[in-house]
Structures are given as structure tokens and as C-alpha cells.
């Protein structure tokens, strides 16, 4: 890590922010082993669970969000999606960061400076704030993720009432905003500092999804159809909704993108499966018209064995 002291004294002509302010190379990056070690040191088993230590769902759900994201207005190399990545948001407190479960930034290079994989996302260096943030609610993180909208101890909330739960992992003062020693909650960072236009919170325990849109500088919860919760994001030309189906061998409710025809957007693997199914249908029609297996294979690009299997089916 670069040991340069920041901020660097200014000179004439002025230096760029890359030379005077910390970059991702100067700040601690995502480190799963270090994070696990810190949890072990500071939390007993019960508090680790209540504080939202990531589980397999925290790995799979972000994968599905990234795999079904299709934005016609942006090239893929002009989008960045981050998962459990340090997001540094305040140049006055450069060591403060949040770790969104998933976030989308549009209009930035896919790679840092177009050349390097990001180890963190540093707002004052990137110059572009996230446009969408998704948090996956866990027991113990409601106040951090939802601010005053948290349902602690109420119907629809998670676990026992807040009075019987540890709050050590959620350092808040007063209304949850920061002191010099205490960073603000995620809710306040996303709403008041980064001003993220769309904020989504989803609980896998209750399958409840909550959509918030920044309106007049404050988050307003959007009214949803409880049987089919969906939110259209016109700036992206996409919607985000709750889909029930199988992903990576797990069948449950997932957050997933859909298009303007309300069709769920497929992953690359699903697209490949759909294409093969269509080819097999074409092959079957050609066989029924009297073409040989070899001719159909040549026309469709399927292997002879695949065409034979289609005919046998």
C-alpha cells in the first residue's frame, strides 16, 4: 500500500485529485479473511448472526442482479456493479466506508482507469455516485439499512424486539447521523451524502421487498402491489421485481430485472438454453419435412447426436 500522507500539500499548477487525495490503492480493500477475523474478535456467535454476517444468499442474489442487468443506453464497459465492496464516501473522513450488498454505477468505466479491476469504489476519485443500491436485510441490520422505516419488533420485522437485541454493530448517535468518531448509518449515507436515486431493501426471511426513491432530497417509500411487487426505473429503461424461480439450483424468491414488456431478463445461461431449445424445434420441423439428420445438423449447427435425439423425442 502507498504510504504517502494525505492530503498532499497543493502546488502550482494544482495537482489532480489522484495525486492529492487517497485512491483505492491507498485505502483498505475488501478482504474476506480480515472481515471474518474482525467478526470473530468482536462478536460472539449470537451477535454475529444478528449483525448480518453474509450467508450464501448474500452471494447468489447479487450474482443474479448482475447477470440479468441489460441496459440498452450504456455499453457494458460503461457500467460498474459492486458486491460487498468497500464504498468510500466522505473525503473528510477517508477511512469511513459502507459495503452495499449490491450497487450499480452508470457512466463510469467498467475497469478503474480502463485498465484495472477495482478493489474498492472511492467516490472522490470516481466522480460518479451509485444510481441503485440494494441491501439484503438480515436480523440486526434493520436500523442500519432502513433508518426510521425499520420494523423492529413489529409484524413483518425480523427477530425479537429491539430492546432484547444487541445493537453494538450499529453505531448510531441521536438520529443516526455521524459524530466525528462515529460514522453514519447506511440509510443516511445513501440518502443524505450520496443521494442514491433508488434504494431497495429485501428480506429473504419474509420475502418482503421495499423500494425507496429519492424525492425532494428524502427517501419516499413507493407503493407496491403486494402480490407482484415491482418498480419501474425510467432512467434505466428497466424494472426490478420479485421473481420466484430457480437460480443456481435454488428455488425461491429473488430480486430480478425485467424489461418494458414485463418479461424477466434472462441470464447468459438461460439465453443459451432458450436458443438451443429453439434450434431443436427447428430441427424437428426439418426432419418432419424429410431432410436427413446430416442435412439438419448442417443447417442448424447442432451436432448429429443432438438432431438424432430431437427426432427420437
Image (cartoon, grey):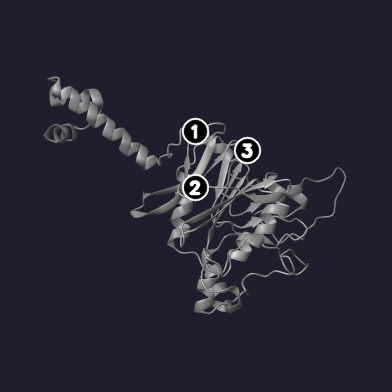
Side (left or right) of 68 relative to 270: right
Mark 1, mark 2: which one is toward the viewer? 2
- 80 or 284, nearer to the observer: 284
Measured from the top left, where is residue 44 in percent x and y?
53, 80
- 234 or 18, nearer to the observer: 234
Which residue is pictured at 58% across the width and 68% down the height?
Answer: 152
Q: Which residue lies furthest to the right in this view?
A: 12
Q: Residue 70 carries which label?
A: none
Side (left or right) of 97 relative to 251: right
Measured from the top left, where is residue 161 in percent x and y?
57, 74
Measured from the top left, where is residue 45 in percent x and y?
50, 78
Q: Which mark is residue 260?
A: 1
Q: What element carries label 3?
A: loop
Q: In which quarter of the image is the C terminus?
A: top left
Q: Gap between marks 3 and 2, in whole Å? A: 28 Å
* Of pointers 3 and 2, the one earlier in the residue sequence: 3
Mark 3, mark 2: which one is toward the viewer? 2
Amino acid at each position: 500500500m502507498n504510504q504517502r500522507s494525505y492530503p498532499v500539500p497543493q502546488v502550482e499548477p494544482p495537482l489532480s485529485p489522484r495525486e492529492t487525495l487517497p485512491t483505492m490503492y491507498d485505502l483498505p480493500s475488501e478482504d474476506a479473511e480480515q472481515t471474518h477475523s474482525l467478526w470473530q474478535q468482536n462478536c460472539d456467535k449470537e451477535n454475529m448472526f444478528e449483525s448480518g454476517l453474509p450467508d450464501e444468499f448474500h452471494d447468489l442474489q447479487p450474482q443474479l442482479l448482475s447477470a440479468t442487468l441489460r441496459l440498452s443506453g450504456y455499453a457494458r464497459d460503461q457500467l460498474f456493479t459492486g458486491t460487498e465492496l468497500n464504498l468510500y464516501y466522505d473525503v473528510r473522513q477517508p477511512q469511513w466506508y459502507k459495503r452495499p450488498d449490491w450497487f450499480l454505477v452508470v457512466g463510469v468505466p467498467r475497469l478503474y482507469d480502463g485498465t484495472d479491476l477495482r478493489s474498492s469504489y472511492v467516490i472522490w476519485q470516481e466522480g460518479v455516485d451509485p444510481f441503485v443500491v440494494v441491501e439484503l436485510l438480515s436480523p440486526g441490520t434493520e436500523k442500519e439499512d432502513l433508518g426510521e422505516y425499520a420494523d423492529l419488533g413489529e409484524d413483518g420485522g425480523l427477530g425479537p424486539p429491539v430492546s432484547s437485541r444487541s445493537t453494538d454493530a450499529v453505531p448510531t448517535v441521536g438520529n443516526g447521523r455521524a459524530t466525528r468518531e462515529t460514522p453514519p448509518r447506511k440509510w443516511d449515507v445513501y440518502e443524505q451524502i450520496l443521494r442514491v436515486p433508488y434504494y431497495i431493501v429485501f428480506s429473504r426471511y419474509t420475502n418482503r421487498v421495499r423500494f425507496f426513491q429519492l424525492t425532494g432530497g428524502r427517501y419516499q417509500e413507493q407503493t407496491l402491489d403486494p402480490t407482484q411487487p415491482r418498480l419501474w426505473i425510467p432512467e434505466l429503461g428497466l424494472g426490478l421485481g420479485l421473481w420466484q424461480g430457480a437460480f443456481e439450483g435454488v428455488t425461491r424468491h429473488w430480486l430480478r430485472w425485467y424489461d418494458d414488456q414485463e418479461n424477466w431478463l434472462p441470464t447468459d445461461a438461460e439465453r443459451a438454453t432458450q436458443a438451443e431449445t429453439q434450434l431443436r424445434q427447428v430441427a424437428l420441423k426439418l426432419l418432419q419435412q424429410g431432410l436427413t439428420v446430416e442435412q439438419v445438423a448442417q443447417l442448424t449447427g447442432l451436432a448429429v447426436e443432438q438432431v438424432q435425439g430431437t427426432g427420437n423425442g
